[in-house]
Amino acid sequence: MSSQWFYAQPPLVIPMEVLLVSLAVVAAAEIGDKTQLLALLLAAKFRKPLAVVAGIFVATLLNHGIAAGVGVAVAQWIGPEMMRWIVGLSFIGMAAWTLIPDKMDDEPKMWEKAGAFLATTISFFLVEIGDKTQLATIALGARFGDMVMVTAGTTLGMLIADVPAVFVGNAMAERLPMKLVRMVAAALFAILGVLALTDWGKALAGA
C-alpha cells in the first residue's frame, strides 16, 4: 500500500478540511483536560475573563504553532511508511489516554504579580507542554503537513472548549456528560488512527 496520502497533503485534502478535523479533535479532547481545569482556576482567581481568554489564545497559538511545526518537520525527515505507523499508533494511544479522567495534581504557579493576561499566558503554555492536546497537534501536523491550518484548527478547538469554562465556570463543567464527551473524543482519535494505518484513509483521500 502506498502511504503518500498520509504524510504529504493530497490534492483533495483541502485546507478547510484540515482546519475542521483539527478543531473537532482538539475541542473534544480538551473537555475535562487539565488545561481546561486550569482555565477554571485562572478565571476564578483573577475574575478578568477577557484577559484570561486572551492569555489562553496567545499561549495556545504559540504552543500549538511549535507543535504543528514539529509534526510537519518530523514527517519530512522520517520515511512515509514509518511515519504512517508512528502517527497511526499515536492516535490510537491518545484514544485510550482520553478515556482517563484528567486532574490538576497541584495548583500551578499563577505568576500573580504579572497580572491576569501574562499569568494565564505563562501558566497555560507551560501546562500544555506534553499534554494530549499538544501531542495531538504534533500528530495532526505530521498527518496533514499544513502547519498554519492545523495550528488554526487546534487553537480554535481549545477556545471553543475553554472560553465557556472561563465565563460560565464550574456550572458548565458539572452539567456536561463527561464520560460521553471522553468517549466521543476517544472515538475521533481512534478513527484517525485506523485511517492512518489502513487503506480506508487512502480511499477517503481520493489518492
Image (cartoon, helix red, strand yellow):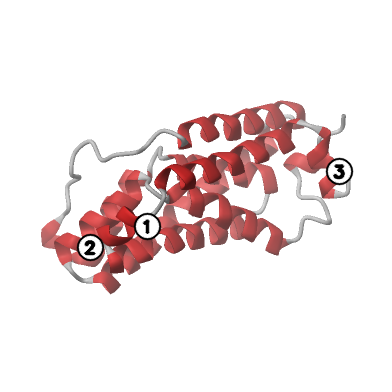
| Quarter of the image where one finds residue 120 | bottom left
Q: CA distance from mark 3 to mark 2?
A: 45 Å
Compare residues 65 and 169 and report the one nearer the observer: 169
Name the residue that disc number 1 marks: 59
Compare residues 8 and 169 and report the one nearer the observer: 169
Mark 2, other Cα within 10 Å: few <14 / some 14–19 / many ≥20: many
The amino acid type, in three-letter code, at marker 2 is Ala
Marks 2 and 1, the one that precedes in the sequence = 2
Horizontal and vertical percent position of residue 10: 81, 50
Name the residue that disc number 3 marks: 203
Horizontal and vertical percent position of residue 7: 73, 40
Mark 3, other Cα within 10 Å: few <14 / some 14–19 / many ≥20: few
Marks 3 and 1, the one that precedes in the sequence = 1
Horizontal and vertical percent position of residue 156: 50, 63
Name the residue that disc number 2 marks: 43
Whether residue 94 is situated above or below residue 19 in the rendered picture: above
| Quarter of the image where one finds residue 15 | bottom right
Horizontal side of 173 relative to 116 (left or right) equals: right
Q: CA distance from mark 3 to mark 1?
A: 36 Å
Whether residue 85 is situated above or below residue 184 in the rendered picture: above
Asked if disc 2 and disc 1 are in contact, CB closer than 8 Å, the reply is no
The amino acid type, in three-letter code, at marker 1 is Ala
